[in-house]
């Protein structure tokens, strides 16, 4: 997923063309924005949970994590090998933390509440050492109707103290007061399928459309003349400029090679066309909402 790694050896034809970074720059596209769309906005934790626990609900995973933690507290068999018990504990707690973050990604809106996660770093020294700053996070819920804001702090803890961090996350969700209303179903039904990875909803309905909508206005293709009902002929922007599809495909192959390595131009064109077809059928507000709201029961 390295967008800034070394470029592969190019043919003489390729070398005559600017590379993707220069092409984006020439069109006034900030690479930071592209990075944010193809990496930062992709739901990483939910996608991992969906792949790893396909067919299992979030509520089931958390329940089993609690059962394992309770078992490990009274265990005396694994205690014979402290390293083994420690690895099991770290695995359970690490997975639980991924699930807590996945809950946030899957619930950007809970009823009338908008929920988000904010990470900040304090400038105050830690343990008297000015070289060490500690960070904490907040879960913030805002109700635009009542203008009420709820905040729950997840305090800093030692990096290896996963137990304290997991407890802090659980307490934060309880303090927000929306836990019972949050969706905790099977993420795999939203994000993955039996098809090839590039056909998963997370890419077809989220990543490719987001990238297309951001980049399209920078590709001023002349399009075609058209006239209707005797009106004066007008020129409309092409929906599928070839250079736009070429650049999108190269960006996706660099950002997610494990998914798009074998992706072709016809597949890219087809994916964008499906997005445009959905766009024509739906209301504008339905196109920009997060991937999670319309959930299966």
Image (cartoon, rainbow, N blue to C red):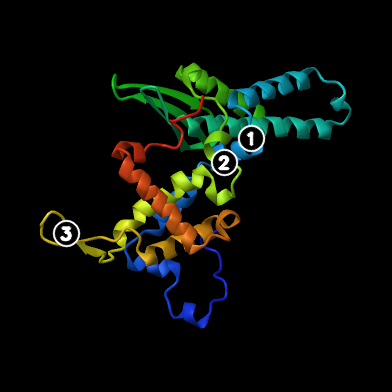
Please tell me whether mark 3 or mark 2 is closer to you in this view: 3
Badge 2 is on which residue? 192
117 or 195, nearer to the observer: 195
241 or 280, nearer to the observer: 280
Q: How far apart are marks 1 and 2 (CA)?
A: 8 Å
Determine the residue positioned at 47% across, 63% down.
265
Badge 1 is on which residue? 54
Asked whether the beta carbons under mark 1 and mark 3 sit within 8 Å of each other, the answer is no
- Residue 42, x across and y down, in percent: 49, 45
Residue 270 in view in this figure: yes
Quadrant, the N terminus: bottom right
Determine the residue positioned at 63% across, 29% down.
56
Please tell me whether mark 1 or mark 3 is closer to you in this view: 3
Asked whether the beta carbons under mark 3 and mark 2 sit within 8 Å of each other, the answer is no
2 or 162, nearer to the observer: 2
- Residue 16, x across and y down, in percent: 44, 81
Q: Distance between the residues labelled 1 and 3?
A: 51 Å
Q: Report helix, strand or loop for mark 1.
A: loop
Determine the residue positioned at 26% across, 60% down.
237
Q: Report helix, strand or loop for mark 2.
A: loop
Of the image marks 1 and 3, the number of the one nearer the N terminus: 1
- 248 over 275 or under it: above or below: below
Q: Which mark is residue 227?
A: 3
Determine the residue positioned at 58% across, 49% down.
197
Q: Residue 297 carries which label?
A: none
Of the image marks 1 and 2, the number of the one nearer the N terminus: 1
In the displayed structure image, the side of residue 173 where residue 161 appears, left or right: right
Residue 211 in view in this figure: no
Q: Quadrant of residue 240?
A: bottom left
Q: How many labels does the image show?
A: 3
Asked whether the beta carbons under mark 1 and mark 2 sit within 8 Å of each other, the answer is yes
Q: Report helix, strand or loop for mark 3.
A: loop
């Amino acid at each position: 997923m390295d967008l800034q790694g070394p470029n592969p050896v190019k043919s003489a034809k390729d070398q005559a063309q600017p590379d993707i970074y220069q092409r984006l720059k020439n069109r006034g596209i900030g690479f930071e924005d592209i990075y944010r769309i193809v990496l930062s906005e992709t739901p990483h934790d939910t996608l991992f949970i969906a792949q790893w626990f396909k067919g299992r609900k979030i509520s089931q995973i958390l329940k089993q994590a609690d059962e394992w933690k309770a078992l490990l507290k009274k265990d005396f068999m694994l205690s014979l090998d402290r390293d083994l018990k420690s690895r099991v504990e770290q695995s359970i707690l690490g997975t639980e933390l991924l699930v807590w973050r996945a809950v946030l990604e899957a619930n950007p809106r809970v009823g009338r509440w908008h929920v988000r996660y904010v990470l900040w770093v304090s400038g105050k020294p830690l343990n008297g050492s000015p070289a060490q700053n500690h960070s904490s996070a907040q879960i913030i819920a805002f109700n635009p109707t009542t203008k009420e804001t709820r905040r729950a702090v997840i305090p800093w803890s030692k990096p290896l103290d996963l137990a304290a961090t997991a407890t802090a996350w659980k307490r934060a969700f309880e303090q927000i007061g929306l836990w019972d209303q949050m969706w905790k179903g099977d993420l795999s039904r939203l994000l993955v399928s039996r098809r090839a990875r590039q056909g998963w909803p997370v890419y077809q309905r989220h990543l490719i459309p987001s990238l297309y909508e951001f980049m399209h206005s920078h590709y001023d293709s002349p399009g075609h003349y058209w006239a209707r009902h005797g009106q004066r002929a007008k020129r409309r922007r092409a929906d599928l400029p070839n250079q736009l599809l070429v650049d999108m495909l190269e960006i996706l192959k660099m950002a997610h090679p494990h998914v798009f390595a074998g992706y072709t131009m016809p597949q890219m064109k087809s994916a964008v066309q499906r997005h445009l077809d959905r766009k024509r059928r739906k209301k504008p507000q339905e196109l920009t909402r997060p991937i999670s709201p319309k959930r299966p029961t």
